[in-house]
Image: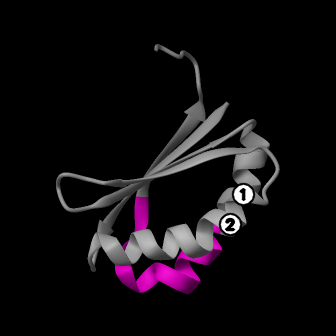
Amino acid sequence: MYITFRKYCLKSDYAALRQAVQVELVPILKRCPGFRAHWLLNCSDGDGAAMTVFDTEAEANVALDKTVSWVKAHIGDLLVLPPEATFGAAAEEFT
């Protein structure tokens, strides 16, 4: 599995971000090969974060290009861009 994590400083309320991601972005991600899951976090500091899981790094990179374009076009006015980002292969799972 390959995981991307992005933290965004919000210019607007979390509810507007959540609505746009749920209605518009998630359907795009679901059509991408290798997509496993997407989480949106309402951070305790008032910011927002997103974590997306794909099977491979290559699949994540294709989806990332689509996501960046979508963010700029649809919710860029809600966020301070660019986000803080990190990514990598899942090395361990502890349950």
| Residue displayed at 57% across by 74% down | 23
- Circle 2 is placed at which residue position? 27
Image colouring: one colour
- Residue 82, quarter of the rendered image: bottom left
- Which residue occupies 27% across, 80% down? 12
Q: Residue at x 47, y 80 (%)?
A: 75
Amino acid on which disc 1 is placed? Lys
Residue 47 in the image: x percent, y percent? Answer: 26, 61
Q: Quadrant of the N terminus?
A: top right
Q: Quadrant of residue 19?
A: bottom left
Amino acid at circle 2: Pro
The answer to if 12 sits in the magenta stretch is no
Q: Are marks 1 and 2 in contact (CB under 8 Å)?
A: yes
Magenta-tinted stretch: 67-83
Q: Is residue 48 visible?
A: yes
Asked if the stretch drawn in magenta spans residue 81, the answer is yes
Q: How many marks?
A: 2
User: Could you say whether the residue bearing mark 1 is in a helix, strand or loop?
Assistant: helix
Using the image, tell me which numbered label, if any, was put on residue 30. Answer: 1
Spatial separation of the CA atoms under disc 1 and disc 2: 5 Å
> x%, y% of residue 32?
78, 56
Residue drawn at point x = 62 percent, y = 63 percent = 26
Q: Residue at the right extreme?
A: 33
Q: Residues within 10 Å of mark 2 (few under 14, many from 20)?
A: few
